[in-house]
Image: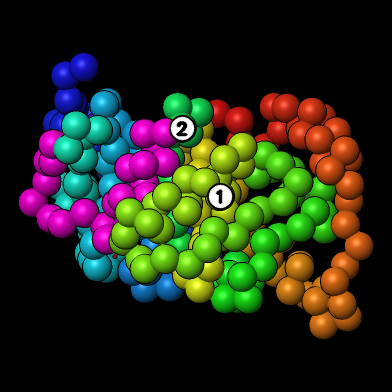
Amino acid sequence: MELDLTSNAALQVREAIIAACRRMNASGLNQGTSGNISVRQGDGILITPTSLDYDLMRPDDLVWIGFDGTRHGHRRPSSEWQFHFDILKARPDLNAVVHAHPTACTTLSIMEKPIPPIHYMVAVCGGHDIRCAPYATFGTKELSRHAVEALEGRTACLLAHHGMIAAGSSLAQAMWRATEVETLARQYLGCLPTGEPPCLSEEEIENVIQRMAGYGHSD
Ligand code: 13P
């Protein structure tokens, strides 16, 4: 497929990514430039550049990386491009990946705690828990392997001592999911001072997943 870098449609995708980055900071989901966003585009991914203030980011600052390794763009891609690339390459069901360091998710990730089925909304991430991937240094292939594994059968995970990843079939869905996961993390943290909360069964979460078909951002 011919790579479309200059059409209105291509520009709109770039603008939507930048707008999502700014929303991510305005809502408190992320701080500074510690997050990054990618969207599948053609036979590759379009990703935010590394260490660039979202308020200064312009559409042509984004970097396209083909699944064959080809790159287009004048900036260096996010230091986390490897897991964005590997997730979108391995998962044809996903078209957008949001990575951030939201406070509640990151607090749980520091404690190396997955989010158990404390609330039925855990089901929006595809299973009965939101796993916490083992720690590996940021930007490494090892971290990417852990992330892809933690996302097996799931659409979000925590990264130990680091943050969270939420993905979706669209950017809007990935952003919606990221907010839901941070809310669940806050709720879990709210329970922990009184002890480990009771959980819903795996069967009930499976039941909710079936009932939820078409619920939320399904685009
Ligand atoms: P960037 O390299 O995308 O600025 O992000 C840093 C980061 O998220 C490390 O986890």
Q: Position of residue 13 (x, y in %)?
A: 31, 37
Q: Nearer the viewer, residue 164 or 110?
A: 110
- Contact check, label 1 and label 2, Cβ < 8 Å: no
Check the image and report above or below for 52 versus 189: above
In which quadrant of the rendered view does residue 22 lie?
bottom left
Q: Residues within 10 Å of mark 1 (few under 14, many from 20)?
A: many
Secondary structure under the numbered disc 2 in the rendered image? loop
- The quarter of the rendering in which ligand 1 is drawn is bottom left
In percent of the image, x 53 and y 68: which residue is there? 160
Apparent side of residue 65 relative to residue 166 in the rendered image (left or right): left
Residue tagged by mark 2? 91
Badge 1 amino acid: Ala
> Residue 32, how many percent across, how many down?
37, 73
In screen coordinates, is 2 left or right of 136?
left
In what element is the residue under mark 1? helix
Classify 122 as above or below 34.
above
Q: Is residue 34 left or right of residue 190?
A: left
Which residue is identified by label 1? 150
Magenta part of the protein: which range? 70-90
**Residue 197 spot, x, y in % from top left:** 88, 67
Q: Tag 2: residue type?
A: Arg
Residue 84 is covered by the magenta coloring: yes
Q: Quadrant of the N terminus?
A: top left
Mark 2, Cα crowd under 10 Å, few <14 / some 14-19 / many 20+, is some
Of callouts 1 and 2, the N-terminal one? 2
Q: Identify which residue is drawn at 67% across, 61% down.
A: 114
Q: Nearer the viewer, residue 100 or 176?
A: 100
